[in-house]
Image (cartoon, rainbow, N blue to C red):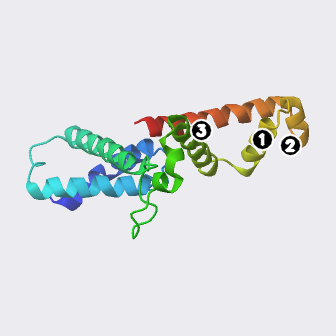
Amino acid sequence: MEFEQLHQKLSPTIKRIAYRLNGHFRSFNHDDLYQEAVIHLWGNFLKGTLSDKTDSYILQGCYFHLKNYIRKVNERSGMVSIDAALCADSDTTIGELLGEHWACDDCREELHNKLLAQSIRNNGFSPREKMLLEYFSQGLTTRDIGKRLGVSHVAVLKMMKRIRQKCSRHLDGVKK
């Protein structure tokens, strides 16, 4: 069987797999995942490892390859060390800039938490969710926040649930 025939036959299923695995990443989308699966398929086709395999086996291999690809990308892009150099042409780290204050574990944790909160806030919250968080940090009740945003307090609760889910996803990515 020629690669074009194999690709044409498996392409719709590979697209569905890529679409299902897409977790709305900043660095790639389901089209990128589809292309990665096709490249994997092409490589195996050239090696001759697909000649005696069933379609199901080949698709399962693409699925596992994409899961592993996503894991690797998440590991590489998940975190930047606070001790990392500030820029490529400088050996100065944030820790060195902070000097003796950096030695305090509480200071490190506080800075880490602030950077994490800033990262979460800047990556994925809508302007309305940012306003809600600002009002919430001011100590306003859900009803007061709803009045200021022009929505019901139930809508505020639903928005807070979405914010918690986004934070949870972000924190899960950091823990990995």
Residue matched to label 2? 149
Position above or below: 48 against 92: above
Q: Residues within 10 Å of mark 2 (few under 14, many from 20)?
A: some
Foreground: disc 2 or disc 1? 1
Residue matched to label 1? 132
Assess whether mark 1 and mark 2 are in contact (beta carbons under 8 angstroms): yes
Label 2 – label 1 distance at C-alpha: 8 Å
- Helix, strand or loop status at disc 1: helix
Q: Earlier in the sequence, mark 2 or mark 3?
A: 2
Q: Earlier in the sequence, mark 3 or mark 1?
A: 1
Q: Nearer the viewer, residue 95 or 151?
A: 95
> Can residue 76 be seen by looking at this rendering?
yes
> Can residue 24 be seen by looking at this rendering?
no
Q: Position of residue 28 (x, y in %)?
A: 44, 56
Label 3 – label 1 distance at C-alpha: 14 Å
Which residue appears at 43% of the width and 52% of the height? 30
Which residue appears at 42% of the width and 57% of the height? 31
Q: Position of residue 36 (x, y in %)?
A: 31, 55
Q: Nearer the viewer, residue 49 or 22?
A: 22
Which residue appears at 17% of the width and 40% of the height? 54
Horizontally, residue 163 falls left or right of residue 71, namely right
Three-letter amino acid code at disc 3? Lys
Three-letter amino acid code at disc 2? Leu
Label 2 – label 3 distance at C-alpha: 20 Å
Horizontally, residue 141 falls left or right of residue 40, namely right
Assess whether mark 3 and mark 2 are in contact (beta carbons under 8 angstroms): no
Q: Position of residue 79 (x, y in %)?
A: 44, 47
- Helix, strand or loop status at disc 3: helix
Assess whether mark 1 and mark 3 are in contact (beta carbons under 8 angstroms): no
Horizontally, residue 13 falls left or right of residue 30, namely left
Residue matched to label 3? 166
Q: Nearer the viewer, residue 85 or 19?
A: 85
